[in-house]
Image (cartoon, rainbow, N blue to C red):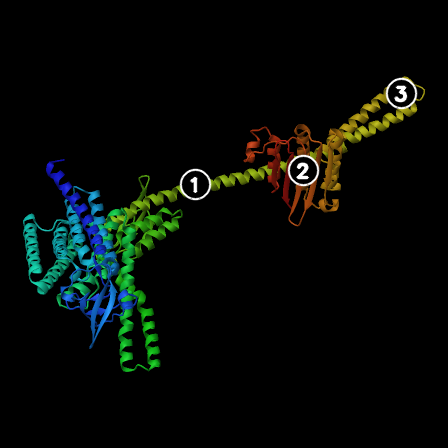
Amino acid sequence: MTAREHLARLSLLALTLAVLAVIGLVIVAQWRAVTLDCELDPQTGIIRAVPQDSLCNFAGAQPGDVVVRVDGVPFAEWKNPDAENHLFEIRRADDTLVLEMPFTPYALVNLPALLSALLVTLTYWGVGAFALGRRPRQFQVRLFFLLLQSAALGLVFFLAYPQSTYRPAWMEIASVLGLHFAGALVLHYYLTFPVMLGAPRQRRAILGLVYGLMLVSLAVRLGLGEWGVRVSFLYNTAEIVAALLVQLYAYARRATPDGRRRLRLVIFGNLATAIPPLFFYLIPAILGSTERMPGWLVGLWLIIAPLCYFAAMARHNVFGIDRLLNRTIVYAILSFGILLLYLGPFLLVYRFAPNDWLAQVWLAAGLTLLVGLSFEWTRARVQRGVDRFFYGGWYDYPGVVETISGALAHCIERAQWVEVLTRRVPALMLLREGKVSAGETPPVAGELAVPLTFQNTIRATWVVGARRDGEEFGAEDHRILTTLARQAETALGNILLVETLREQLAEIRASRETLTQAQHQLLRSREDERARLARDLHDGPIQDLVGLNMQLGLLLADLPNHPDQAGTLQAMRGEVRALLGELRQVCVDLRPPMLDTLGLGAALRAHAEEWSAQTGVAVDLASPPDATLRALPSEVAVNLYRVAQEVLANIARHAHARHVAIRLARDETRLTVTIRDDGCGFDVPANFDELATQGHFGLVGLRERVMLIGGVCVVESAPNAGTTVQIAVPV
């Protein structure tokens, strides 16, 4: 850093601290100064106004009273007030009164103006310091900083002392200097920001004229009294108007689209700050009128500009803000127009027919109908005009990109995608409706064809409709349509991928349905085969063995005198009977005969009794009447019986249980089978499919069997807490 740069930074830092010191000095000065809490002309001694809750009112002072003496000293010669009570000799009409009135700190009497001054000046000071802190080396930022600090220095005295008679002479000079320099710096700033206007030689000539006129106006202001004040206000007004015109010219003609987007909020703040004080304070002051906007209200308007600058600098994405301002301005214009529409006719009615309520009702109804019918048409045209000012064109470029990009990002259907391109884009860009066609499609006159590719292949052509105003597409139109086309290609790629995934998913679903049907068929075939084998065994080998057993019995009856041969036949008959029992048990296992004759309840009861006898584990079975369960479909009854067999087999192998409870419950829609044991239990995984990894293959097969008949299987268990298996099947 060079010595010159170092000195410049120290100077800027000193100015920052000086403005803060001046603000503190004003607070201290107003707190130390004392005055009456009524409006007193220090030149004539006339009391012009007495607030209702003031100490002067409590003391008996009234508007129009004239202070003649204070503590025996003529009012014009009395110069030593303090915060104590003083004796005031007052002339009221033809009477002379003596009132004891106290003085109070000027800060308390002047509190609204002081607070307004502090709010405004601290805002100007803070925004300038914020800008300088972010870009300390940029020339325009330094100029902006000097502008705000000069304005803060001038405004703190101007706003804190609304009556110039209470303002010390040095404060008056400092205020005039700050405001005049701020006015010149405004023009200097907007000649260089956002773009440099004119050639360097032209800028030097203009700035020389600006600063020269500023010095002339300053000299006139300090040397010509009341007329100097008017000339000074006229010069300040001219500077403000010139600065606004220069800024609007730079925005509309010279700034880039990105620069215009950055300037919208700033222009709004400058216009909102300048226009009310210009018409309601500066112009009345130039004309010498005393009826003008109070200083504290001027301060509230002046705070808008630095706050808008701060918002524009602090936020990287101000699109949401400028669109909000855009809509706010539109509806403010509409509201003002409606107010004028109602105000004029109603003033005429009240002027010429004040008591004709019928005319007033008809007028209100007619105006309301007119507003309702024309509101949308008027709003569209006001919106277009505001858009032209805000966006330098006839639609909101950032809004189109943001809105359409968001809509395309949410498209997963081809119809949605086509609707966005052919309807929403034309609605936002004021185009005629377009179309999307497969392959390459040539456009007609005024249209624009945009090919959309995916994986280096043209998949569709977006034919953009012509502009509604009949103009050709400009560079901005091509730029935004190119951006939207890239977004549309991305969305199209996503849609094609989604469609491919859906086709694959449909194939997987079809395969699963085919597999499920095959499993159903396999299950039926297996049960049918078991039933056939049971019948064949019963009708074939079992009947043969029964006949053989009978023949052996007859032979034994014919050999009573041959004990050796009888013993042999008796042993053979025992083997035949054992084989017959085993074959009958095989038939029962293949297809319990009770299942087809007496139903599921009876079959389960018989199997539970046999299982309990074999394992020594007590079984408690509760079920509806057998007649209720006998009506179950054969496929459901068989599979539930097999499920119960598998569960009881698992209990016998793994549970080490002492008691088992089986409950069957049926309602109008489903049959529920619950089997609960008091065995050792186990940890049930969150995913049922993980049972296979833990070695519970029987439960996995059980669940698949239940699912094949449309049921649901739930397993609940915990270590040392037993196991509950519940099956629910629709019937």
SS assignment at label 1: helix
Q: Where is residue 317 in the image (x, y as percent from the top left)?
A: 28, 48
Characterize the local packing of mark 3: few (<14), some (14-19) or many (20 or more) Cα atoms within 10 angstroms. some
Characterize the local packing of mark 2: few (<14), some (14-19) or many (20 or more) Cα atoms within 10 angstroms. many
Q: In terms of sequence position, does the residue under pointer 3 or pointer 2 come before the other?
A: 3
Which kind of residue does numbered mark 1 sit on?
Leu
Where does label 3 land, which residue? Answer: 566
Q: Quadrant of residue 704?
A: top right
Where does label 1 land, which residue? Answer: 501
Mark 3 or mark 1, whichever is nearer to me: 1
The span from disc 3 to disc 1 (Cα, nearest Å) is 80 Å
- Observer-nearest of 69 and 608: 69
Characterize the local packing of mark 1: few (<14), some (14-19) or many (20 or more) Cα atoms within 10 angstroms. few
Q: Position of residue 357 (x, y in %)?
A: 35, 80
Horizontal side, residue 720 vs residue 439: left or right: right
The span from disc 1 to disc 2 (Cα, nearest Å) is 42 Å
Residue that sits furthest to the top in the current view: 564
Residue 626 can be seen, yes or no: yes
Residue that sits furthest to the right in the current view: 561
Which kind of residue does numbered mark 2 sit on?
Ile
Q: Quadrant of residue 187?
A: bottom left
SS assignment at label 3: helix
Mark 3 or mark 2, whichever is nearer to me: 2
Where does label 2 land, which residue? Answer: 675
Residue at x 66% of width, y 43% of height = 672
SS assignment at label 2: strand
The span from disc 3 to disc 2 (Cα, nearest Å) is 51 Å
| Discs 1, 2 touching: Cβ within 8 Å | no
Residue at x 86% of width, y 27% of height = 551
